[in-house]
Image (cartoon, helix red, strand yellow):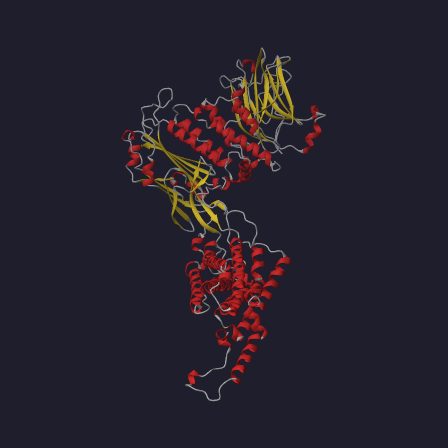
Amino acid sequence: MRLKCLVKENYDSQGDCTKDPNLCSKGFSISIWEKADFSYDIFWTINNLESEPKRYVLSTGGDDEGHPGIAIYHQGISLVAIVSTGDEYWKLEVYGPFHNSTWNNIGILWSKPVGTNGGLEMHVNHRRVGSVFKGISATRKSALSPPELMIGCHKDNDNQLYRGYNDAEFDELAMWKRSLPDNETMYFLGGYEGEMSFIDPEEYQIMLERTDLKDPSQLATAFSVLSRMDVSSWPENITDEEAVNSTLRLQNAMSTLTNPENIPKSITDEQWITFLDIIHATSNLLDEETENTWLITEAKGKPGATEVARDFEGFYLDLLDKVSMNGRTNLDYTKTSENIAARCHKKRIRDLMSASSYVTPDYSQMMSLYSDWDRPLDKAFVPTDIFTDDRCLERSVSILTVLYDSLDDVAHDKVSTSTIRPSMPNYLDSRVMSVRMRGVPELDEQGLLIPSSPLCYPDPDSLRQTPIKVVLEHKIKERALRRILFHDEEPEIKINYRHCVRWNDRAQMWDGSGCIVEYTTATYTRCSCKGFGSFAIMAEELEPIVAPVIPDMMLIIIQAGYIASMVCLIFYMLVVGFTGDLKDQHHLVGFNLAGCLLFGDLMVLLTYFLPIPEDRHNCAFVGSLIHGFFLAAGGWVAMMGHTAFKTITAGVIGGKLRAYLFLSWGITVTSIGVTYLVFMRHLGTDPRCFISWTNEVKGVFFVPQLGFCSAAVFFVCIVFFNLHSATLRNADVLADYKAFCIGASILALYFSTTWAIGCAALIRWDAAVPNLYPIYEILNCFTGLVLLFTIGFGSRRFRLSLSGHYKKKRQMLNNYRNKNEETQQLGSPEDQRRPISAASTVVAE
């Protein structure tokens, strides 16, 4: 293979002294970038370096044998720099300061020793890796003639054969005709576009401390270096703690660089364009690869990604204020990076107000990024009649629009509790767009604000009357739940609602106050906001639909309880239905209640044994039946309480059954109708098939149910306090209905307690609450059993009818009357005695 190197022949530029350092009165500095590949065998050369071949990086013919000039070369694992004046040479040798197969910067600086200063110093990747103060005497030989600058090889005046070839890549050779001081060695890194991941953030901070940031050229270089420090290329084995510390150091460096005091009072267009390069450093820090690092940083209470964005925007506004217009009336420039587009616009306020509205950003200035970002729809429409002071008309206004493509990924999702439910999963569902506008302040010669000059800020009242319209494109293209779809074959919806939010600097969170949603589609949302700031769309996700867990043993008890209750309810209904002595109003109310509970329990039991929850339509149907039967049961419990109340306080034992029927079922049917008319597309979403997963739909059930329970408890409380002063005077009748009223009161209290706990268990609360669902199910599954023992066996009349006592008593009375009946009956047939029947037992007694 033919070896090659780069040679600059007749190298004799005016003022350059690297061909013979004797001519360097102020010394010199050299910087070059190299990308070399080293094999692992290089580590075995450390004990025998002299036998290793030299691979030259750069040479002007100098060596340690008396030839004047300079040389930088690799020899085994060492990196060597030589500066020779002929009579004296400085040789510096360091071991292994390189990163393999990546770009490395090599810089040397030299000056003749004076006092304690001078000598040879070497920097690798902006780290000082070694220095030598005192030179070594040598016998002077002739310098290379004609002079040459060689990159990748070497020769001297006595041996004109090129040798020491270096199979590497080189770039960015730079020379200075002086030895750079410590605060200028960052110039070694220059404007190189390659990798900068080797620069440690801690060392970069130290470098900034040695840098005069008020010098525009040094500030620009610091920007350039920081912009090329790619945080996404940090070592894969870096720990979270190390990543956080490094990120915080870079953030602190950003704050140092973007200090407004670093900006001169007035800057030229060239300086302005150079300073705008800070956008690349900001883009790197806000890259989506840093999401996890920022999450950990913010969890520790440290400033997050939004703080970086605020520093960046403040610095850009200060730059825009101070760039000289040079007689122009309009300056409009968009600076872009991979993740950020920033439009800087400066014009006269009078010209701004002549337009009906100000539309930003200007995508025609960022066509390449416009394509890379998949043709974004984000726009802001800013009203222009927001400056009310006539003294400001001839002043300039600075308008900054920043569109962040990745800030939504790395910024935290903390939201204000006043406008958004923080308990729901929230995330930013759009790019973040920042729009800021302010009049350029008038400054005196010292750069201080002139007190008599108006501030020329936009008028807040005008913004409240004519808000800013912001259109933001969604990252997730789907409709919110406000347009939820019902059928299984239609798309699944994960977003409950979208909010327009603005970043609140004081509270350090996203805040929806001052912004409203004007219009929303699956693709974008249009917001109306009463002020400037950083805008975004906050998507509120549907709460994960996960039913509370019931332990296996408890589940068996619940299922057995429902079965036992159904048997008890059927038994009660058969006794009341086929026993003529129990056709009074009290037991007929109990009969209706038992029927509702029976079918309600059956529906719940089916959800345990059949795959009903797996099909939404079936779940919605069964859920509606559960809704209807248990709500009707609540109505009959309330009616039972009222029956007991009227019996004890007024002696009324009948005549209300038809009214009770209409009240119980009328309210129930109305409640079910509301769910289908208003909330039909929410039905069947509960994994237990209890109406719906949505609280609003459950509220249609629980409001009347708790109303029924409250009425029942009110009635039974009055019954309890009036049992000893009942208005019934017949002892037997009082004994019958007093026992029934006591049982009905106990049943009403049990039923009301069950559904009070059920409300707490089935409604989803923002605050953390214990899992009450198993307790509710235990109570509910035994309601039928409680009914049988309270208004069934607890009723004297029920027990006597069940034992046949009333039947025997009627038979005995009929026999007695027949025996004493007169042979000749007088009067009309209507006046004659009739046999005592079950329906007239109460009157006979």
| Position of 316 relative to 782 (above/below) | above
Query: Which residue sits at x=29%, y=38%?
Result: 355
Which picture quadrant has residue 97? top right
Query: Which residue sits at x=54%, y=60%?
Result: 746
* Residue 5: x %, y % from top left: 58, 28
Q: How many marks?
A: 0
Q: In the current view of this chain or complex, which residue is farthest to the right? A: 47
507, 568: nearer the viewer: 568
402, 219: nearer the viewer: 402
Q: Is residue 310 left or right of residue 445?
A: right
- The reply to whether residue 665 is visible in this rendering is yes
79, 139: nearer the viewer: 79
* Residue 595: x %, y % from top left: 52, 68
Q: In the current view of this chain or complex, which residue is farthest to the top? A: 115
545, 672: nearer the viewer: 672
Question: In the rendered image, which quarter contains the N terminus?
Answer: top right
| Position of 738 relative to 154 (above/below) | below
* Residue 254: x %, y % from top left: 49, 30
| Position of 791 relative to 282 (above/below) | below
Q: Is residue 648 left or right of residue 396?
A: right
* Residue 56: x %, y % from top left: 61, 25
| Position of 545 relative to 559 (above/below) | above
- The reply to whether residue 225 is visible in this rendering is no
